[in-house]
């Protein structure tokens, strides 16, 4: 999923507990509904003992609990700036004995992207609240191999016992006190050798994937005593990688007769059959995998049987998700981890893998028989053709590591993909008429990484720039959009802006999908239709963008080529001369962006200006957030006032004033009085109310974007890195306290490379961002070395990093 690297400096942002903060005001917070997930769902687990209890985990957007109406409830929204890595969930376990108990292994990265160790979150109320057991090592919820699992397992006969398989060579860990304390299992010595790319100096693809799953065989034990037989899968290629203990984890050995050619992704027990089903792929996933297999292991006889559903030229993918129907022993399903073309694939067997039927099959090429009907009514923007190939509709998905059948309802199934959760309620029709209904069932899972938000004064109240799924016009905040941005359709829209005086004029920029044309697009109808800006040079991408008041000039601080300016969609001028002088800030002039002037105002000791916004109503009224606080100028930056009490500020926004004609409400993600939170000031920063609460932390503050509604006083939109967009409205009166009055400083020290815009527009831009280039994305295979072989009659063409197609 969208992988916004977080700088290590975040570790310094620990919350000071005794701070005299601003006063508080209660707000009602809700997700802006996108409705289709939007990112990778690597794990879904049903509780085997209580009907209807199921959870999904995501790689950057936390965990969710399933509701009876197919919707999902988020469980980790409390995670704030100091706990942002809780949103990377590498494993989950739901207790088969005390079904109220839930455990989540959380942490974002095992390399330097995340400075924090991981933790096991422990709940006894189905995930409503958690205790935290800090681990002595990192957990990688957004690392390679995150779809293998589950790495965390509860002993079904003695549920105080848990095992957790760590990454990075840290081995196998055990708890005997319901996850509160953990000790290393010293007798388990094979901690895995596989790394996706040993040459990756970032550490992201060169870290050991480690122990990938733990499966208890409850049939080997009796209730109340530790289960003797435990299987463990380890990410190694060509060396023993499935291990077993028959003495509750004291001693271990490789399971005899195993075929260790590939990496075991899942080890799923069919208790009635006393059989372990193991899926294999030749990579760790989630993007790769060009070969694989499926085996079953008869625990009684010790015999392994290869039950791979396809072979020969039909086998060009690894295998991920494995499901067993606990009500119908012998009914099993397996998902192709990544069949990128012509579509994903799922197989089903009702005879323990002796015979199989697929979800689709070739007819006379290029005809495809689809043994399903498809519904994306919960999130119409997803499809039906979200991967556009010349063969037409491709729908089933990719990165399919999570595949489950409801243990209480053989008709109910779910699977996770790189973009959403699919599933249905008529699975048994697969075995009768061989035709099931697949629906997008991610309602409530909001798992997007938001890059930019705008709330123009007219037209739709919100438009978004989104990682991996492009972005949207949000005509309604409570209904999923019918389409993402199209023509051009970029996987990631890096930023978006509107023209202050003519807000139907919108500009957005892309991040390098060269097959989709220029990376600047202009709309004159509030984002309904778009045209490429042919002034943009090819392959110049990313960064931040601002539109001038009248929509004639685009100021683009491109990620690849620095600041660029274009007027009337003429060729972008290379503005590097000004960029070269960028130890102080810039203004977009009112003379058609032909000249910029640096100002003399000081941003104190700032080393990292974060965001510049302008008051649309007052010429020269500018706000700048920085790593040392918030600064205000009413003279176009000639002098700045440091806002007292604010010691750090990230995203800032101006919205509708409290009183008609009054100063706009000012919103900030900031550290005020030692408390990192989300604040509003109705008096230009003299006093503040904190508007987020203990249940709404919004994750990493420096990763988030803000925009405020110019039409609705109090309304603010927060775009997160992994939990989609929230909107907040005032729902209670503020308690009143006053922060010390502001003091004015007006010196002439230079600012760093913050770019400003013309003071009379609402356009805004920044040049200093804290995240670097994404290293992976959810929609495909950045760095993927997948199949380049196609069915006969066609040739494979790698279209972009996300998929290949056969033409
Ligand atoms: C959480 O911690 C508190 C305080 O130590 C303890 O009383 C409670 O039992 C714990 N709950 C769980 C689920 O471990
Ligand atoms: C092990 O698996 C590989 C890959 O599926 C296969 O080529 C090989 O024949 C298998 N080895 C045995 C001994 O079955
Ligand atoms: C497993 O092997 C045993 C011993 O050969 C046999 O009795 C049993 O039927 C096998 N189980 C399955 C599910 O085939
Ligand atoms: C399965 O049902 C759908 C919906 O009725 C239909 O469009 C599709 O053609 C059917 N598939 C096959 C292979 O008959
Ligand atoms: C843009 O990038 C694509 C893909 O790397 C490349 O094929 C194309 O030649 C590039 N275009 C220019 C003008 O550099
Ligand atoms: C602009 O100038 C920079 C710095 O010299 C250079 O890297 C870039 O290729 C130039 N051209 C464009 C189109 O940005
Ligand atoms: C900048 O930092 C220095 C050294 O810590 C300090 O003395 C000075 O007051 C700071 N200036 C401002 C404007 O905060």
Image (tube, rainbow, N blue to C red):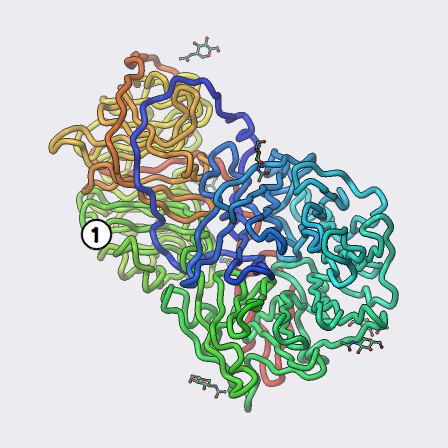
Residue at 31 percent of width and 23 percent of height? 23
Q: Answer with left or right where residue 373 lies relative to residue 9.
A: left
Q: Using the image as rendered, state which of residue 623 and residue 754 is in the foreground.
A: 623
- Where, by quadrant of the figure, is residue 738 drawn? top left
Is 301 or 27 nearer to us in this picture?
A: 301
Q: Which residue is mark 1?
A: 504
Q: Quadrant of residue 643?
A: top left
Residue plotted at (53% across, 40% down):
130
Where residue 139 appears, x then y in whole percent? 64, 43
- Residue 477, percent from left and from top: 29, 53
Residue at 36 percent across and 32 percent down: it is 678
Would residue 282 be found to the left or right of residue 480 on screen?
right
Residue 578 in view here: no
Identify the image quadrant of residue 348: bottom right
Q: Is residue 778 above or below residue 745?
A: below
Where disc 1 sits, the SS reads loop
Asked if residue 256 is positioned above or below residue 571 in the image, the reply reads below
Q: Looking at the image, which is closer to me, 446 or 231?
A: 231
Q: Is residue 507 visible?
A: yes
Image location of residue 467, percent across then percent down? 45, 51
Residue sticking out furthest to the left: 660
- Residue at 39% x, 17% y: name it: 20
């Amino acid at each position: 999923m969208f992988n916004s690297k977080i700088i290590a400096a975040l570790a310094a942002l620990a919350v000071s507990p005794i701070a005299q903060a601003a006063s508080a005001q209660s707000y009602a917070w809700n997700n802006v509904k996108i409705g289709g997930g939007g990112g990778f769902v690597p794990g879904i687990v049903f509780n085997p003992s209580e009907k209807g209890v199921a959870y999904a985990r995501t790689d950057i957007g936390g965990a969710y609990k399933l509701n009876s109406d197919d919707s999902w409830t988020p469980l980790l929204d409390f995670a704030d700036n100091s706990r942002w890595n809780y949103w990377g969930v590498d494993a989950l376990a739901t207790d088969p004995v005390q079904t109220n108990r839930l455990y989540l292994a959380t942490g974002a990265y095992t390399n330097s992207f995340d400075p924090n160790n991981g933790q096991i979150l422990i709940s006894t109320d189905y995930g409503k609240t958690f205790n935290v057991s800090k681990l002595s090592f990192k957990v990688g919820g957004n690392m390679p191999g995150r779809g293998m699992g589950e790495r965390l397992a509860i002993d079904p006969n003695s549920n105080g016992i848990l095992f957790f398989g760590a990454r990075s060579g840290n081995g196998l860990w055990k708890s005997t006190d319901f996850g509160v304390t953990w000790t290393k299992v010293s007798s388990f010595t094979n901690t895995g050798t596989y790394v996706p790319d040993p040459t990756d100096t970032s550490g992201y693809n060169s870290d050991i994937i480690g122990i990938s799953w733990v499966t208890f065989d409850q049939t080997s034990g009796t209730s109340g005593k530790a289960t003797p037989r435990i299987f463990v899968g380890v990410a190694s290629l060509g060396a023993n990688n499935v291990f077993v203990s028959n003495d509750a984890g004291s001693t271990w050995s490789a399971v005899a007769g195993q075929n260790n050619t590939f990496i075991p992704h899942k080890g799923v027990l069919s208790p009635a059959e006393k059989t372990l089903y193991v899926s294999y792929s030749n990579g760790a996933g989630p993007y790769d995998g060009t070969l694989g297999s499926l085996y079953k292991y008869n625990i009684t006889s010790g015999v392994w049987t290869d039950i791979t559903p396809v072979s020969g030229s039909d086998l060009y993918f690894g295998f991920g998700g494995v499901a067993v129907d606990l009500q119908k022993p012998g009914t099993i399903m397996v998902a192709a981890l990544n069949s990128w073309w012509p579509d994903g694939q799922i197989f089903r067997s009702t005879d323990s893998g002796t015979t199989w039927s697929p979800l689709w099959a070739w007819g006379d090429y290029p005809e495809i028989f689809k043994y399903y009907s498809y519904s994306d009514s919960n999130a119409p923007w997803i499809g039906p053709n979200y991967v556009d190939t010349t063969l037409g509709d491709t729908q089933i998905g990719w990165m399919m590591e999570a595949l489950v059948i409801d243990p209480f309802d053989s008709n109910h199934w779910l699977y996770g993909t790189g973009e959403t959760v699919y599933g249905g309620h008529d699975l048994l029709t697969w075995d009768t008429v061989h035709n099931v209904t697949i629906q997008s069932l991610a309602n409530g899972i909001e798992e997007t990484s938001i890059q930019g938000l705008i709330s123009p004064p007219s037209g739709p109240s919100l438009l978004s720039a989104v990682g991996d799924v492009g972005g949207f016009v949000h005509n309604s905040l409570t209904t999923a959009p019918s389409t993402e941005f199209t023509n051009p359709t970029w996987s990631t829209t890096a930023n978006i802006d509107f023209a202050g005086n003519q807000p139907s004029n919108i500009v957005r920029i892309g991040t390098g999908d060269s097959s989709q044309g220029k990376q600047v697009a202009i709309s004159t109808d509030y984002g309904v239709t778009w045209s490429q800006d042919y002034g943009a040079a090819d392959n110049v991408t990313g960064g931040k963008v601002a539109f001038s008041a009248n929509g004639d000039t685009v100021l683009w601080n491109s990620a690849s080529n620095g600041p660029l300016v274009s007027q009337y969609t003429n060729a972008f001028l290379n503005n590097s001369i000004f960029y070269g002088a960028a130890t102080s800030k810039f203004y977009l002039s009112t003379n058609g962006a032909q000249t910029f002037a640096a100002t003399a105002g000081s941003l104190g000791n700032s080393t990292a200006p974060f965001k510049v916004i302008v008051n649309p109503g007052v010429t020269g009224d500018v706000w700048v957030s920085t790593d040392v606080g918030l600064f205000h100028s009413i003279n176009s930056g000639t002098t700045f006032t440091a806002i007292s009490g604010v010691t750090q500020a990230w995203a800032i926004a101006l919205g509708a004033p409290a009183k008609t004609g009054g100063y706009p409400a000012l919103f900030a993600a900031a550290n005020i009085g030692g408390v990192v939170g989300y604040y509003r000031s109705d008096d230009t920063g003299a006093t503040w109310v904190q508007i987020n609460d203990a249940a709404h932390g919004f994750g990493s503050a420096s990763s988030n974007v803000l925009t405020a509604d110019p039409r609705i006083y109090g309304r603010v939109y927060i775009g997160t890195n992994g939990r989609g967009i929230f909107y907040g409205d005032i729902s209670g009166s503020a308690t009143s306290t006053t922060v010390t009055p502001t003091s004015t400083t007006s010196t002439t020290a230079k600012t760093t490379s913050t770019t400003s815009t013309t003071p009379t527009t609402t356009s805004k831009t920044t040049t200093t961002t804290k995240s670097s280039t994404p290293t992976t994305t959810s929609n495909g295979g950045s760095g993927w070395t997948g199949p380049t072989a196609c069915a006969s009659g066609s040739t494979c063409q790698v279209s972009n990093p996300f998929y290949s197609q056969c033409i």
